[in-house]
Structures are given as C-alpha cells and as structure tokens.
Image (tube, grey):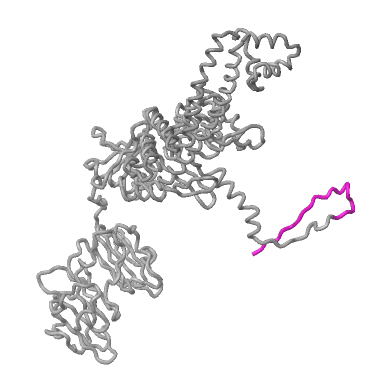
Amino acid sequence: MARKKTTNHAVQKSAMPDAYIAGAGVVEEEKITATLEKNYMPYAMSVIISRALPEIDGFKPSHRKLLYTMYKMNLLTGGLTKSANVVGQTMRLNPHGDSAIYDTMVRLARGNEALLHPYVQSKGNFGKAYSRDMACAASRYTEVKLEPICQELFRDIDKDTVDFVPNYDNTMQEPTLFPATFPTILVNANVGIAVSMASSVCSFNLGEVCETAIAFLKNPKHDILSTLKGPDFPSGGFLYYDETELQKIYDTGRGSVKLRAKWSYNKADNCLEITEIPYSTTIEAIIDKIVECIKQGKLREVSYVRDETGKDGLKIAIDLKRGMVAEKVMQKLFRLTPLQDNYSCNFNILVGGTPKVMGIREILEEWSAFRMECIRRRLHFDLQKKSEKLHTLLGLQKILLDIDKAIRIVRETKEEADVVPNLMIGFGIDEAQAEYVAEIKLRHLNREYILKRTQEIESLQADIVEIQETLVDPKKIKKVIISELKETAKKYGQPRKTLFYYASDIEEETVEEVVPDYPIHLFLSESGYFKKITPASLRMSNEQKLKEDDRIICHLETTNRMELLFFTNQQQVYKTKASEFTETKASVLGDYVPAKLGFSEGEMVAQMLATSDYSGDLLFVFANGKIARVPLQAYFTKTNRKKLQNAYSSKAPLVQILHLPIAETPANIFLRTDGNRAVLLADTLIPQKATRDTQGVQVITLKGKQQVSGAWLLSEEETEQRKKYRIRNIPAAGSLVKDLPDPGQMQLF
C-alpha cells in the first residue's frame, strides 16, 4: 500500500521570476509503512518513553520536572508560595501549557487525596480525586510547598547520584531520575495510557513496602505475600483478600483486585451512610448508577440518594424505605453499583528506556539495582571530596613544622603570582596544597587552628578506608539501603487505609428482586413477536396487530412474576422472566423474541411456557408419533443461566409441547394425524424420562408417510365427546375421524 506524496518548494518570485525548481509539484509514490515509520513511530516512542509511563523511581517526566523545580525553589524547607509561581518556573523544564503543569501538581497535592503519600503540601481548594465535578481553584489562588517526605526523593541528589541532562532549550540541567531512598513506584498509584500500551500501578502501604524491600535485600527468595499484604489505596474502603489473585499480580504484574465501599447504618434516619468508596470510581458515578437503578425498578428498597460530602469528608446518604434490611440492601448495592468495583493492575514500567511489565519481585530487583548504583555514585563522590580534603590537610600539616617560614615566604615574595610557586618549593607541596595554604586568613595562622585542622586527618583517613571497603562489598551497600529504608518507614509509615474482607464475609444469600405481581396476558405469534398486556388494556382494545400471514400461536393468562421458557426450532430453550418485558398494547407488534433473547441465526420460537415453581411434566409430541415425557424440573437451574441446549430430541420434527400440571386425576391427550386418524389416551400410559432429549415412546402407529399433525389436552366435556377414540395400550393405529373439529388451543396455565 502506498500513498501519493506531493513535493512543494517555496519559490521567491521576486528573486526568480522565470525560474522553476526541479521536482516542484511532482507526485511521488511512498509506501504507507515508510510514512508510519517516519512520522508516527517517533511520536509513539516519545509518548511511551517521555510522557505516559513511570520509571523505576516512580515518576513520569512531568512529575519529576515539577518536583525538581520546587526543590530548586527551596520549597522543601521554605514557606508556601503561590501555585502560579511554581507553574511558571516549571515551564523552564516542561514545555507544555500551564494548565497541564497545574493538573499534574493538583494530583500530587495533599488536598486532592489522590496519593497515599502526597508530595505537595497544599493550601486552598485542590478538588478531590473521588469527585468528578469538584474542580480545583485556579493556580493564582492556591499555595504549595514540598512535603517532608520529599527529603527522601532528593537525598544526595547533588552528590552525582543520578545523571543530569540539559533541558529542552539547553539553559539548565535536570535529573533523569530521583535517587529515592524507598520504592516510590509501589507506594503511590500511577496510571498512564501510551500508544499501544498502558500502565496501572496500584499503591501499597509504605511500611509494608519498606519491610518487603528489606526482606528481599536479605533474601531474594523471600515470600513477598508474607510481608506485602495487599494494595493500600488513599480512598480507604475494603479489599477482597483473594490470595490466588494477589499471588498472580505479584508474580506477573497483571490482574485485578475487588474493592468495596465502607458503610454504616444510621438507624435514626433509616439510611445507609457511605464514607469511603473504591479508588476506581467517583461519588457522581455511584449516585448516577443508583438513580438509574431506581428508575429501572431494580432498587425499589431505596427512596432517595444524596451527596452529603463536606468539610468532614466524603459521605453519600441512601434513604431506605420502611421495613428494609440494611445488610441485604447493601449487598444488592454492591452487586448493582460501583460501590463494589475492580481495580485492574498492569505494572508496565520503563527500565532503561524500555517498557516492561514486571511482578513485585522483579520491580524490587530493578529498584535495588538502581538504588545500589545511586549509593555507589554517592560513595565515589564522598571519596573524591574526602580525598581532596585529606590532600590539602596533609599540605597544611607540613606547614605546621615551620609556620614562621611560611609567613616569611609570603612576605618576601614580590609578585602575588609567585606566592603559590614559592610555597610549593619551600615546603615540597603541590599546587592544590599551596593554594589552600595561601588562602588561609591571617588570624588563622596560629598553631591552635592548624592543629585542630590537622587532627581531622586521622578521621578522614578512616572514612576513606571505610568507603573503599564499602564500594567493593555489595553486602555493605545493601546494609546502607536497609538502614535508610528502616529510617523512612519509621518517619513516614502510617496504618493501612484499605482493610481486608474475606470470602466468609460475603453474603451467600442472593437478594431477590422486588417484582410487583399482577395479572397479565401473554401473546406469542408464529413469527416470534411477544406481547405482555394487562387485563385493563386488553378490555379497551383486544384486536391484535400482526404482520401479514402471522398468527397468534400461544396465549397465556398468568402473572408478572412468572418465569418464561421459550423453546426454539433448534432444540434449545431460552429462560427469562415476564417482568423483563415491558407492558404494551394489542395495537403494537410487540417485542421480537429472537432479537430480545439473542437467538442464533435462523433460530425461531417453537413454543412458550410459563411457570413459577417448575412443577409438573412436559409432553413433547413429535411428528413420528412418539411422545417424550420430561419433568419440568429438568429445566430448573440454580444459576441465572439464560440458555439450555438439548432441550428436546432432534430425531423428529416437534409438533407441540404440552404442560401437565400436578393433578389428582389423569390428563387426557388427543392426537390427530394428517391421515385423518386420531387417538385419545391417558397421560399415565406415557412413562417419565430423566433426560431432556429423550426420543420418547411410540403412541400412535403411522402408515406410509403419515405424520402427527396436532396434539391437545382435553377438558372433561371434550373427552366425553371423543371417548370412542380412547386407547388402552400403546402404540395403537387409532380410529378414522369423521366430521369432528379439532379442539381449540387450550389454556395451559
């Protein structure tokens, strides 16, 4: 596949009035794959690497640029400043609009409550992560500074612990990563959508993360689940403790956790009060769903819902109708609304510029390697500084032998530029040592000052030896990391906000739908159109609207709480409830059942039955003269299965399905063939079969190509009229029918 490419060249006509540039306006063929590689791939890679996915230090570039700007503005130790000031300064590193930068700041702020451990201390309205409509104030009104925990992000950042790169206009330097002293990637939630991939890292408790990291550094085969109990979200609530699913997330980095809201029952006001909600939803989404369920009649137990969120925090009040059981209503709300929701985990993290989905153990491995490199670079930096200081102090020690000589050399040197060379010659020291000596103030040229300074030599030498030993021993570096993790956990650790609930806490009893019960008429046409009509509506107009050549094949008088079974021409039965259909009038076509219930292609309704308790038997009358008797209980399912296969035998065409209710006297069945023969028999002659797709027993003997054309259940009066057709044994040939009309379609219920 190729696209046309037009080459345009700007021509200044004033300079070249009659000239033409070669190739101008020529249409060239270019493969679409080449265009994608040249134009789209750089954009995709930029989004993946430089925008949407977090790195091993737990931050996206936008977060890092903002926090580093605040660090350089002395907002770690200084006072609050207007957010607009920070946004403006951040533009030196982040070439995006002020609104994008401010939105990033809002999510990092304590007031927004989006992070388990916020990095930005805030003053003013920063909105709420749990509210879709609660917007933050403009940046000119709010104030910010860095939270104390940011000390752990920037510790030793000025000691060459991480790489620095020029900003976009090459006017200043910015860090590529933060040398965080704890695994920030696991402590705060991070969500990003890139091109063709995404990331969703849930947050964990800081104390548990530090404990797990320490245990992992000591033993790489440590059981992660024993110390890292599960995700911990800033919104609180409850998390379903599914050890199998958690182990899957810890091993693969993918999976989902189930979250529930925290609630209580206010007996005085007869209302449910929701004070903590799942991290993955909002107040507005919950209220909208509850209102929708109320309108659809799925939450008849609830009379009103309102948002009472205020200064005291989140609160949703749900008023109950009189007599409702709070526990049962809450279980229903968990099932129907986002008060119970899932959080999908996808630990897709950039490592060395490459996106990688990792489990917890692999994340800790990468973070440990990164942190060990930070420690090594810091030790190298300290080693260099201490070595330089030791070197200068050794030079100062030599001067201690003859301070008067040093003073005389300086005093007798005519040119200032010759002071350092003369000191080098006089004491046998190098230029750096001589420069240090030359810069000593006159007041410090006394033995006491010089002795105090030279006493540092021993401690410096000991420090240098210790640093050198640590650099070559990974175990000692790990001890440094462990001590920092313990210190961080002690200073900033906090109790879990998200608690656990277990399988034993889940109500096994399903909440029954409150469905109003009233009489209805059900109509089914041959082409599959269904109508539910109330008696009052039917009395006003009973003329049924049907398509051309269509006819009513089933009419039932029943109630709205009945379950309906639609048997099809492909030996399947679809189960639903009468309450699932809306009431209509005789003057409309009604619901098209194959579309409503999702029939397969070419599948049509053969018969409709209604039941409330699945009692009695079904008689399947086939064209080959056989009848199968199956208990209706065979179609009952404990789960809400909508479709059952092998509903009846496929060996012969189905003529009719008859329902035999439980009765004291036998039912009478009348069969008629297209050869004008008929039989009348009691249902006791037909044995019951256990399997649904049984072929049944032969009832009537057919000659040639004759088939059964109809089957009916007869009343006592109709039985008396046809008693001459009664048979005592099966199969039977039946008697010829003379001038006897077929019975009318019987009401089955």
What is the magenta range?
A: 1-20
Residue 194 is left or right of residue 321, and the answer is right
Q: Position of residue 617 (x, y in %)?
A: 18, 70
Q: Is residue 614 left or right of residue 170?
A: left
Q: Is residue 15 magenta?
A: yes
Q: Is residue 528 above or below residue 317?
A: below
Q: Would you say residue 638 sits in the magenta stretch?
A: no
Residue 541 picture quarter: bottom left
Does residue 287 appear to the left or right of 135 in the view shown? left
Residue 440: image location, x then y, percent? 62, 13
Compared with 107, 540 (above or below) is: below
Residue at 63%, 60% in the rendered image: 33
Farthest residue in the bottom direction?
704
Extreme left residue here?
664
**Number of on-image labels:** 0
Residue nearest the viewer, comparing 328 with 354: 354
Vertical relation: 421 (above or below) 543: above
The image quadrant that residue 291 belongs to is: top left
Q: Is residue 36 above or below residue 470?
A: below
Q: What residue do we see at 69% from left, 11% from top? A: 410
- 271 or 422: nearer the viewer: 422
Report whether residue 128 is seen: no
Q: Nearer the viewer, residue 99 or 215?
A: 215
Q: Position of residue 425 (x, y in %)?
A: 69, 18
Q: Main secondary structure of the magenta part?
A: loop
User: Would you say residue 643 is visible in this rendering?
Assistant: yes
Quadrant showing the C terminus: bottom left
Q: Nearer the viewer, residue 68 or 111?
A: 68
The picture places residue 71, in percent across and down from the top left corner, at: 54, 28
Residue at point 64% right, 64% down? 1
Does residue 740 appear left or right of residue 225 in this picture? left
